[in-house]
Image: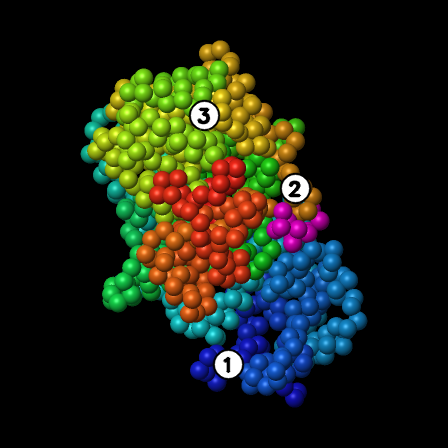
């Protein structure tokens, strides 16, 4: 052979080429190890062995030489993935191997397009040469094993092939990335190995976490005062630890607000994972307003470096406060290690978002799919599960069911307002054999025991002025007002401010996505402090404040919205039960609007139920009927299941979006820290760390809103804009009254 075949050029400041035979062998072994978890290790092995087979093409070796020497003004890329994919297609057409190999750089393709690509005559000669060279170095490529029966044994329906392909793809991509990283960036490989390491280099594992949590919970339970709230919390914790002994599958955890589900749910997950030899616990949270709250609760008990936090709004501020401090160098090192772990979720306890979890499960790009194999053998807690969009429920439940049936995953559906996910209806194929962690009769008792509010209905239609009059009449110096749209929040703020004789402007606060994330965190912190110190506090908010935000108002006003949102808002009233009964007013805004689509449908169904005599909003069973009425045709609005059936991976990734992609984010120059970072970017290129730093300073605008105000924005990188218009200290971004309308979903990437 003329060539010494290489996989990669030498690393920076190094003269060591990455040998192709070594790379293929290492990736094959690592992919096999990952895929062994779901009994397809041999498939993984050959995916790894053949993934870079095309690099045996001499033209590719010439390309590597040119890249290394820098010769020529333009170096033309040489395709290589297609050749290993063609070999897999010719030998094992019924397996996913060709799809994995073809897509390991560019992303999983649509299966229907593969044959035409392989039949293109321009690749034929290179394919023959590459295979001949590979056989000389690797040995015979034609193997005797028949993988088709193995693949068939893993398929339960037409969607099983889709998920099997994704998980195998994840194994291959992660193995390839890790081996390539070890060649080019060995220091990062060391950082990965050090992540979550104790002083003696003993990696923190699930046993450590369960021991710490168990000790803490037992201490808290023994020292807690006797009260109805603490009695419920004790019973919930006991039920969770008892249920953890049960075999895996799908569980429901229905706990009223204040019942301790955050820590009791984690107790179930950790104990269950240890009992059944699972690898990790993944908690998926929907809202920006609660993920940091959840992480902080866990870290207070388990330790600072025990939780891997993965979402775009993760707070990096602590690592950048003073670049001269040695302690911050250590912090940045720890942060760098954690960022590496987020790439493939190689950690025992992960807190992420429903967007990150599900959009990864339906993605086709290597970087998004890389983590998926580490979902196998895990416990997934879906917090506030009722927030999953109705229009995507069919594919979501399909994947969750398959993960539980075939991939040793246990799922916990966690919320006070349980959706109707069990059994099959005419429109939705639900999850099988859902078990209640809290027995239904006991759950009802818990909701009755923690009944801390009275509901009042005013459905005849209130003007904003009538809303404020009621606030004044009842002398509420602390109250939460939740509206359906951003425009309505501004209207109520203006009405409050017009009553200067009744309200001090310093006592009025606002939360919506008109504020950047950093601003919202500060408002929440201020509101919590004022509530704790019994200071006047009127908070006007969109639904960003609902579902899990730890606030405790004596009175809550909720504009008629989806029934589950109303009950979640009520959970911000008399949360600790110290007031006897709090006051929750459900009113119909005569001047307000309701977002169209799923939201409007839910509001219409809620109004129908609220008009029913003797409706008991303290009975958790009412949500079964409510959610079933919502699951009409429209649980798969983008026909994703049909696309999955056809193995059209690019189109699935394009269509599956928990957050509508019709928004543009702008950076708010909110404080000196962001202004300093933006000044730095005048003199250098933006990098991934900058994007993460800037995330808490962004506001998402609908595209039509952005276009109206584009002349106020400065583009500092492709698609990245700095806001140059007004930003009010209470109302947030201002782009004209006509434009401010519905809140983009307050989910996180």
Q: Residue furthest top?
A: 613
Give the alpha-carbon distance from disc 3 to disc 2, as whole Å: 30 Å
Taking the image as shown, residue 454 lies to the left or right of residue 98, namely left
Give the alpha-carbon distance from disc 3 to disc 1, as whole Å: 63 Å
First of labels 1, 2 by sequence position = 1
> Residue at left 28%, top 20%?
475
> Residue at left 30%, top 53%?
304
| Residue bounds of the magenta highlight | 645-655
Identify the residue position indicated by label 3 in the image: 559
First of labels 3, 2 by sequence position = 3
Q: Residue 659's spot in the image, x, y percent?
A: 54, 44
Of 407 and 353, the residue lying toward us: 353
Identify the residue position indicated by label 2 in the image: 638
First of labels 3, 1 by sequence position = 1
Q: Residue 665's spot in the image, x, y percent?
A: 49, 51
Residue 336 position (above or below residue 79)? above
Taking the image as shown, residue 345 lies to the left or right of residue 321, namely right
Q: Residue 509's spot in the image, x, y percent?
A: 34, 35
- Predominant secondary structure in magenta? helix
Residue 48 position (above or below residue 670)? below
> Residue at left 61%, top 51%?
653
- What number is the disc on residue 201? none
Q: Quadrant of the N terminus?
A: bottom right
Q: Nearer the viewer, mark 3 or mark 1?
A: 3
> Residue at left 49%, top 11%?
613
């Amino acid at each position: 052979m003329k060539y010494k075949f290489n996989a990669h050029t030498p690393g920076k400041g190094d003269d060591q080429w990455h040998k192709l035979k070594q790379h293929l062998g290492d990736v094959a072994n690592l992919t096999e190890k990952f895929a062994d978890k779901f009994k397809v290790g041999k498939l993984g092995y050959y995916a790894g062995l053949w993934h870079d087979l095309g690099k045996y093409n001499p033209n590719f070796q010439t390309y590597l030489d040119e890249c290394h020497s820098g010769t020529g003004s333009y170096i033309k890329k040489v395709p290589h993935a297609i050749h290993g994919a063609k070999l897999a297609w010719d030998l094992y057409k019924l397996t996913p191997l060709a799809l994995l190999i073809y897509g390991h750089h560019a992303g999983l393709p649509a299966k229907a397009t593969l044959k035409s690509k392989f039949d293109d005559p321009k690749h034929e000669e290179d394919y023959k040469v590459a295979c001949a060279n590979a056989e000389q170095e690797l040995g015979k490529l034609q193997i005797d094993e028949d993988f088709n029966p193995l693949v068939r044994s893993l398929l339960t329906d037409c969607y099983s092939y889709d998920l099997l392909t994704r998980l195998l793809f994840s194994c291959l991509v992660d193995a390839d990335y890790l081996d390539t990283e070890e060649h080019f960036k060995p220091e990062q490989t060391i950082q990965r190995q050090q992540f979550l390491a104790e002083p003696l280099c003993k990696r923190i594992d699930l046993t450590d976490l369960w021991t710490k949590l168990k000790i803490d919970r037992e201490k808290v339970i023994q020292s807690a005062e006797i009260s109805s709230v603490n009695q419920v919390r004790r019973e919930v914790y006991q039920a969770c630890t008892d249920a953890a002994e049960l075999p895996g599958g799908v569980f429901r955890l229905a706990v009223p607000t204040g019942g301790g589900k955050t820590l009791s749910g984690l107790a179930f997950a950790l104990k269950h994972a240890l009992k059944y030899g699972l690898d990790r616990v993944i908690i998926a949270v929907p809202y920006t307003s609660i993920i940091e709250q959840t992480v902080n609760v866990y870290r207070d008990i388990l330790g600072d470096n025990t939780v891997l936090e993965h979402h775009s709004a993760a707070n990096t501020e602590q690592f950048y406060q003073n670049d001269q401090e040695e302690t911050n160098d250590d912090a940045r090192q720890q942060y760098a290690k954690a960022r590496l772990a987020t790439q493939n979720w190689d950690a025992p306890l992960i807190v992420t978002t429903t967007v990150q979890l599900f959009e990864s499960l339906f993605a086709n790009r290597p970087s998004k799919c890389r983590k998926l194999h580490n979902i196998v053998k895990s416990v997934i807690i879906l917090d506030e599960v009722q927030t999953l969009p109705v229009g995507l429920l069919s594919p979501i439940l399909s994947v969750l069911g398959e993960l539980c049936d075939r991939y040793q995953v246990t799922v916990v559906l966690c919320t006070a307002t349980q959706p109707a996910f069990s059994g099959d209806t005419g429109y939705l194929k639900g999850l099988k054999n859902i078990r209640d962690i809290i027995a239904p009769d006991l759950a009802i008792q818990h909701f009755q025991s923690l009944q801390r509010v009275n509901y009042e209905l005013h459905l005849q239609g209130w003007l904003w002025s009538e809303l404020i009059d009621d606030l004044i009449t009842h002398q509420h110096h602390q109250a939460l007002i939740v509206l359906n749209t951003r425009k309505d929040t501004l209207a109520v703020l203006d009405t409050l401010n017009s009553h200067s004789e009744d309200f001090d402007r310093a006592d009025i606060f606002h939360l919506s996505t008109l504020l950047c994330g950093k601003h919202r965190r500060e408002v929440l912190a201020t509101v919590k402090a004022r509530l704790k110190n019994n200071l006047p506090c009127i908070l006007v908010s969109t639904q960003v404040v609902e579902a899990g935000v730890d606030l405790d108002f004596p009175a809550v006003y909720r504009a008629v919205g989806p029934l589950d949102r109303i009950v979640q808002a009520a959970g911000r009233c008399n949360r600790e039960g110290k007031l006897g009964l709090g006051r929750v007013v459900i009113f119909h805004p005569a001047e307000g609007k309701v977002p169209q689509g799923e939201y409007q449908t839910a509001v219409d169904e809620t109004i129908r139920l609220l008009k029913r005599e003797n409706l008991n909003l303290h009975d958790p069973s009412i949500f079964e009927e409510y959610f079933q009425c919502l699951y009409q045709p429209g649980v798969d609005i983008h026909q994703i299941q049909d696309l999955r059936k056809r193995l059209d991976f690019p189109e699935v990734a394009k269509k599956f979006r928990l957050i509508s992609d019709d928004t543009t984010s702008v950076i708010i120059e909110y404080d000196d820290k962001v202004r300093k970072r933006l000044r730095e970017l005048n003199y250098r290129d933006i990098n991934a760390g900058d994007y993460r730093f800037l995330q808490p300073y962004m506001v998402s605008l609908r595209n039509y809103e952005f276009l109206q105000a584009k002349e106020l924005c400065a583009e500092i990188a492709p698609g990245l804009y700095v806001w140059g218009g007004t930003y009010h200290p209470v109302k947030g971004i201002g782009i004209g009254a006509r434009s401010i309308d519905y809140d983009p979903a307050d989910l996180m990437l």
